[in-house]
Amino acid sequence: MNDHHFIRITLFAATCLSWGLLQPTAVKASAQKIYGTPIHLTGTVNTHDLGGIVAKNGWHIKPKRLIRSAALAHLTKTDRWKLTKNVNVKVVCDFRSTGEIKVAKDAKLSGVAYRHDSVMADKNFGVHTTRQYANQLANKQPNNMQLFYQKMVTSSHSIKAYRSFMNQLLKQKHGALLYHCTYGKDRTGIATMLILACLGVSKQTIMKNYLASNHDLKGTVHKEYQQLKRVTHNKRALANFKRSKSAKAAYLDAAYRAIDQRYGSMKHYQKAALRLSNSDVHKLRMMYLTK
């Protein structure tokens, strides 16, 4: 299904819903096949259960097994209860840098194991004042995000982090694994791309799932943009901020392209970079998929 067909179907569903010809649950079920189920938390954003996303041959991801999110530093008591008791989170995998964690350490979740698999080698990645950030943005090239996404799938440090993440998934026999970075968009977006690809989810669905972060982060990004404008009016800095806080197809395409150029295909990347055997991929599908 191309994007034009998807838009037509979405508009048709919205029209039918307004006329009372289609139940809200039907629209919700259709969206779940691409986006999973949103988990509404007060203390963080961009949190989704990947359960319901459709893979090949009628399979779909089991609910309460794979959870993606932004950082967990400001979870409320109700948020913590929801994640541990309702969603059944058993392991949290944090992709942030050591510096980011020092600034905003995840809230402790009772009975939940914590893993730190920093995707970026720079221990202070993502740590800066607003003015420092403005200066950094003013000096970045317009294609910086494409280069960043390529680095996340090709640098030895990043690959090691994602390999560790995959190894944990292979061990996760029960309960949910929640993985996150700061916004749940870039480092988490690549992790989601990799696990969904292993589970046989189409590239088209992976892309649509990735782009949904734009909706979930809209309020957060607007607030930070206003803060940035208080310290700079540099047009390049402001433009690069918008680029860095957006999920764009060009970014994920850059990651796919880097994988194809260096490894030939996603399948070979899984074997050579992530060191997943055919047996490992089969095991992941048996663990995380259902009909």
Image (cartoon, rainbow, N blue to C red):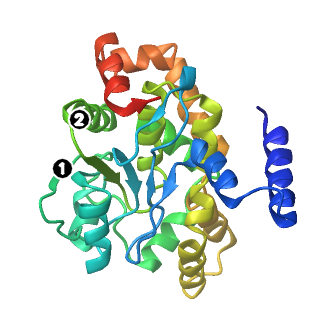
Q: Is residue 161 left or right of residue 251?
A: left
Q: Which residue is mark 2?
A: 164
In this view, the residue in front, 100 or 56, is 56
Residue sitting at 33 percent across and 38 percent down? 158
Q: Earlier in the sequence, mark 1 or mark 2?
A: 1
Disc 2 crowd rating (10 Å Cα; few below 14, some 14-19, many 20+) is some
Task: Identify the element where label 2 is drawn.
Answer: helix
Quadrant showing the N terminus: top right
In this view, the residue in front, 159 or 80, is 80
Amino acid residing under circle 1? Arg
Q: Is residue 179 left or right of residue 85?
A: right
**Quarter of the figure with residue 83:** bottom left
The correct choice, above or below, for 117 with respect to 17 in the image is: above
| Labels 1 & 2 near each other (Cβ < 8 A) | yes
**Quarter of the figure with residue 164:** top left
Residue sitting at 26 percent across and 79 percent down? 77
In this view, the residue in front, 209 or 275, is 209
Residue sitting at 84 percent across and 39 percent down? 5
Q: Position of residue 174 (x, y in %)?
A: 21, 41
Number of marks in the rendered image: 2
- Which of the numbered marks, if any, corresponds to residue 115? 1
Amino acid residing under circle 2? Ser
